[in-house]
Amino acid sequence: MSEDYGDAYPVEVQWERPRRMTASDRRPRIVVLPGDGIGPEIAAAARELLARVGEFELEERLVGGASIDAHGTALTDEVLADCRSADAVLLGAVGGPKWDTTDPQAPRPEQGLLGLRKGLGLFANLRPVRPSAALLDASPLRRERIEGTDLLVVRELTGGIYFGESGRSDGSAFDTCTYSTAEIERIAAVAFRLARRKVTSVDKANVLETSRLWRETVTRVAAQHDALELEHVLVDNAAMQLVSRPADFDVILTENLFGDILSDEAAMLTGSIGMLPSASVGDGGPGLFEPVHGSAPDIAGTGSANPLAMFGSVAMMLRYGLGLEGEAAGIESAVDRALEDGLRTADLGGDATTEDATRAVLANL
């Protein structure tokens, strides 16, 4: 991408949980980036939820395709500066066929997301997977296989093959995967800080040199957390174990490419990718919180988008971004109760609209 968003934050800095905000604090300032497709619809639902939960200062800005249409770039310097000065950033979704192109010089919506990750120094992506009891039968796996699943994927977000040197020459192509010890140390520290009993570190150490460095470094970090178990699992085995014994996992720690693939696989344990929230955090600055699903342009404007992943992302923002644990747990409980009462959007086999789902959650808050 052509934009220059500056250097990422120093690799030696490690993310810490935020302190809890109190009534005497100023109202938290949240930049809302609705984005494209169904993004504006679920962002509007999130604003309703936040209005019920507490007092927040919300500022809406453009990103992705909407920003390309208005400004010719997926992320302007002004919007990035607004995000940097906020307490948290809430994103809907970016992308759509309108902006698809094979021209390497043309702006693409995804550049907005990558620019935010780099510009905010967000090196850790957190994806919780906890199937709601009411949706156990919606999963493609048998109920008894997924019952009790409550895991967290901690994915390194700013290194690896996605950010290495790449190119084409004389009919061949290459993508370079590079990791430093410091990059591995800081993401491992996040995983051990969030684990309750065990960290499963996923790599391909039987083949890749970067994975061997990953395994050595994670083992060294684990020595500082001797109350927690560490297991090393090869990525192909991890993919099988996720569908055969998902309830045995606590925290899954892995590099960028593997984490991208495994977190989407884990998402299907819940029955729909429309249920999965995520958080991207860095060195203490504002985090970025967004649902895992994409912009779903095929249903944009129909009022049928599932807002529950966005509500889960709001809960993660309150917990990991603002230190408001009680409010976060309240939202998650309200979503569970709404599902227990029969709420089902189209992706869950029902006919509830975005508005129906929003009302059902607010009624249980």
Image (tube, rainbow, N blue to C red):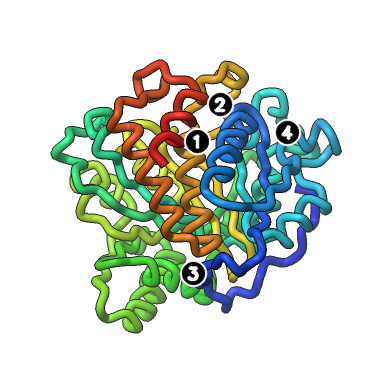
Residue 292 locus on image (x, y percent): 49, 41
Give the residue at x 47% y 74%: 185
Q: Which mark is residue 293?
A: 1
Distance of mark 2 from mark 1, alpha carbons?
Answer: 8 Å
Callout 1: 10 Å neighbours few (<14), some, many (20+)?
many
Question: At numbered mark 3, what does the secondary structure look like: helix, strand or loop?
Answer: loop
Q: For mark 2, what is the residue?
A: 296
Please report whichever mark, 4 or 3, sits nearer to the chain's N-terminal start: 3
Q: Position of residue 87 (x, y in %)?
A: 64, 61
**294 lies above or below 173:** above
Residues under numbered marks 2 and 1 in contact, where contact means CB atoms less than 8 Å apart: yes
Q: Amino acid at mark 1?
A: His
List the residue tagged with mark 4.
65
Label pair 3/2, CB-CB below 8 angstroms: no
The amino acid marked with disc number 4 is Gly
Q: Nearer the viewer, residue 235 or 308?
A: 308
Q: 338 or 10: which is nearer to us?
A: 338
Q: Is residue 361 visible?
A: yes
